[in-house]
Image (cartoon, rainbow, N blue to C red):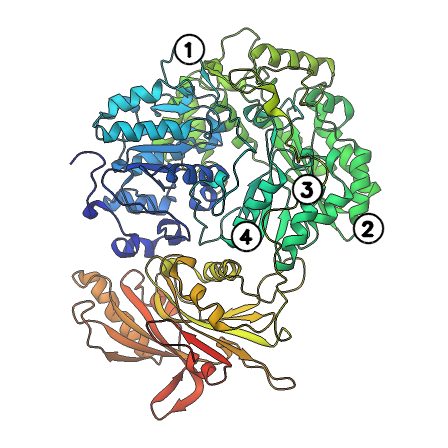
Amino acid sequence: MARGARSEKERIDPARDLYRLLSEVENPARYVGGEYRSIRKEGGGLYRVALSFPDLYEIGMSNTAIKLIYGMLNALPEVACERVFVPAPDFEEALLRTGTPLYTLESGTPVSRCDLLAVSLSYELLATNVLTLLKCGGIPLRNAERTEKDPIVLLGGPGSTNPVPFGGFADGVWQGEAEAGFTDLVAALARMKASGSTRQDQLEHLRSSRFVWYAGRTEPARRAIWSGFGSARASRGVPTVFGAGFPVPSIPVIQDHGVVEIMRGCPQGCRFCHAGVYYRPYRMKPVEQIIEEVEWLVRDLGYREISLSSLSSGDYGAIRPLLAALNERYSPYGVSLQLPSLRVDSFTLPILEQLHTVRRAALTFAVESAGDTAQRWTNKLVPLEKVIAIADTARERGWRRAKLYFMVGLPGPDRANEWKRIVDYVSELRRAVPLEYVVNVGTFVPKPHTPFQWEEQLLPEEALVMFQAMKAELPRGTKLRYHDPWMSWLEGVITRGDERAGEVISRAHDSGARLDAWTDYLKIGLWQDAVAAVPGSDRGLSAFAEGEPLPWSSVHPGVSESVLRKERRRAYEGTLTERCLPECLDRCGVCNDRDMAPGEVMESDHASGDPPVSTASKAPDPAAGTAPGRNYQLLLEFEKRGSAAFLPHLAVVRVFERFWNRIDLPVELSVGHHPKPKMSFGQPLPTGIESTAEIGLVNLQNTIRLENFSDAFFREMSLPEGFRVRKILVVRHEHNQPRIPAPMQRYGGSIFLVWPADPDDPDLLTRYTNFLALCAEQGGDVTDVDVTDGEGMARYVDLPGASWGLGRIIARSSSRGAVRARRVRIYASEAASETGAQDLFSWYQDRCEQFVSAPETGALV
């Protein structure tokens, strides 16, 4: 069968086909997909792209670039872009042991059957993860060994601006911003596939792009720069910048909030900063476009936390009026705003107050280097008196804790005593403003394409001595946290390495190196052995002479090397460079007629002053209604099947928190620094267990008419795959009367339909039998049932509330993966009738004001 012609038999349905494997691993929800707004396209002629951020799901789904590229590519009719992430070691072992290929989350297509594997590499320590993707996906690790049946492997992202260490693994490395031509390139490859071209033809076309580096390229690849940032047209649906949209994670991820990029690039020119070069020039997005994107993230996706992202958010010209406009519109809904990157010189009290409107923002100061002389070397001034003034004001307004960030090993005078200057800086700050300070310190890693690309890196042994000295000298009221200097050592080996660093990556991976950016997984000894086995592979840690050939000179970032040398000389002289301005006074080479005209760098029309009136209507008052709030609750009965069964209880809570936002339900929020909807659910289920009778309850701010919400509740597209609302009702609490109890207060027990996961496996069948025996022993009632599941071996198990829970019985009987189960009924306590215990939902229904069920099971009452 030709590559791309995929039958249904080749595809993997994780919830169905991998139940036993998923039952054995930690956090199986990473591997099942089915999230709200995930896009699944069908058709044999589609050009299928497996898109990956090479890390665990929780990290990959926090990455903004992955979401943007996913939406951009899926906006192309002929392209199906699907996600794949790196399996944790337990799932990797299970896949390899059973011969199961790594697959995409949308359609379950094996990665090896895709046309293109596109990997966004933001960090050098993800290197072995790329090889894990290839190995688990059944793709040869070396590009020279791939054949016509294998996908093209393309890397990109800021972690690959020195692509040389990856030259033996990647078929190509995209340099720069994906919006600047990447979708056109993929569309061209899709047309070539449709016309019958070979993989080699497509690879040659890909390598003909001036933005694609590959081993053996004879002229430098150029960085793609998008000139359209901030000029996207208004839209009625998904904002143009998001393409076809992207999925909302069903499980908590590391950065679990909606992100709007308000500015790309940074005008400041810090000499140590790789991102400052990679994302030049700085470009601002109009306020009305930002509001449109926030509206979609809140209303359509259900986010309550919005991050206004940039490298230096305080440099956005209209930041204060923007925050005011967003808070006025969304704070009544408990939507909070974050600015993850604020420089001290742009950190003002009004900004702090705007960020504190809903949730208290963290007080963070990225100082980097201590003292005026050292800060002139880095071109980043963070005056101590400014930090003291901000911290003092924050303390008066209730802040009790602040975070400080520094680096050791930066170029500068007397580098060996840099730690002392940091201690003095923090000590003086602590004396002036007695907050609790968390002092975070890392080791500086010189990066390619920066003014410090020629500098020597501080060795980990030296850094550890400094960290221990700081720990002993820092004053009381401070806490030191430092980044493992051996991780910085490894980053330095790769980021300025050559082909020998690529050999080290291969050796370390073969030895078992995995997920090296995680301290829990890093095995630094494997890397030390690999470096020792390849002479000269640690060349990237040493200083380079100006004029010496550099491995990364095969990539042109837009900023010329002569400009970098000039900035390095200014550092040694202690001379500051002015910030980048629309009327450029110190040209770096990025703004040119070929890639970016100077006029396109200028601030948008609305980047300063008051924001314009948004074209979106003003948000309604969520407290508006026909009756006072806090006396009404909404109860729903819902199904949780298929992929949804693998979501843990807290993930289910998160799913419904966002669901309320999507349907504009006026829910009551808790008070305090982190307001959340007031909700409660029935007895939580073990992961992997389905249900057709789950119960959830949420407090309302005011009464509602259920018929106005019934379409939204019963529209399955509003929830992740596997969820389905069956019934809803509203109960009202009478004044001076006992409140109607929460579901767990009236919980009497559950009835489960259970059956063996594989009736043909003697071991699993024995464990299933042991499970049934323990159910009966612990007070459960086991009865026969006339169904065909498990070849007649299915049973009903009634577990009263006083007995062990299902999860405990499964664990004690060692039957995880051997038993499949579905909760079919929850009944109320102390509500027996002639026909037995009353369903818990029916108990509430007897006390409700309004009730409605899904169209196929009933009508409005």
- Quote the CA–CA distance across marks 2 and 4: 32 Å
Disc 1 versus disc 3: nearer the observer: 3
Label disc, if present, on residue 396 of the rendered structure: 2
Element type at marker 2? Answer: helix
**Residue located farthest toward the right when viewing the structure as drawn:** 432
Amino acid type shown at disc 2 = Glu
Amino acid type shown at disc 3 = Pro
Disc 1 versus disc 4: nearer the observer: 4
Amino acid type shown at disc 1 = Glu
Element type at marker 3? Answer: loop
Q: Residue under circle 3?
A: 611
Quadrant holding the N terminus: top left
Label disc, if present, on residue 637 of the rendered structure: none
Element type at marker 4? Answer: helix
Mark 4 Cα within 10 Å, few/some/many (few <14, many 20+)?
Answer: many
Q: Are marks 2 and 4 in contact (CB under 8 Å)?
A: no
The residue at 35%/52% (across/down) is 32
Q: Where residue 527 appears, x then y in whole percent?
A: 44, 29
Near-viewer residue (740 or 515) = 740
Q: Are marks 1 and 4 in contact (CB under 8 Å)?
A: no
- Quote the CA–CA distance across marks 1 and 4: 46 Å
Query: Taking 468 as reference, is 710 left or right?
Result: left
The residue at 36%/13% (across/down) is 216
Q: Are marks 2 and 1 in contact (CB under 8 Å)?
A: no
Q: Residue under circle 4?
A: 298
Query: Taking 499 as reference, is 8 left or right?
Result: left
Sequence order check, earlier mark of 1 and 3: 1
Amino acid type shown at disc 4 = Val
- Quote the CA–CA distance across marks 2 and 1: 58 Å
Sequence order check, earlier mark of 3 and 4: 4
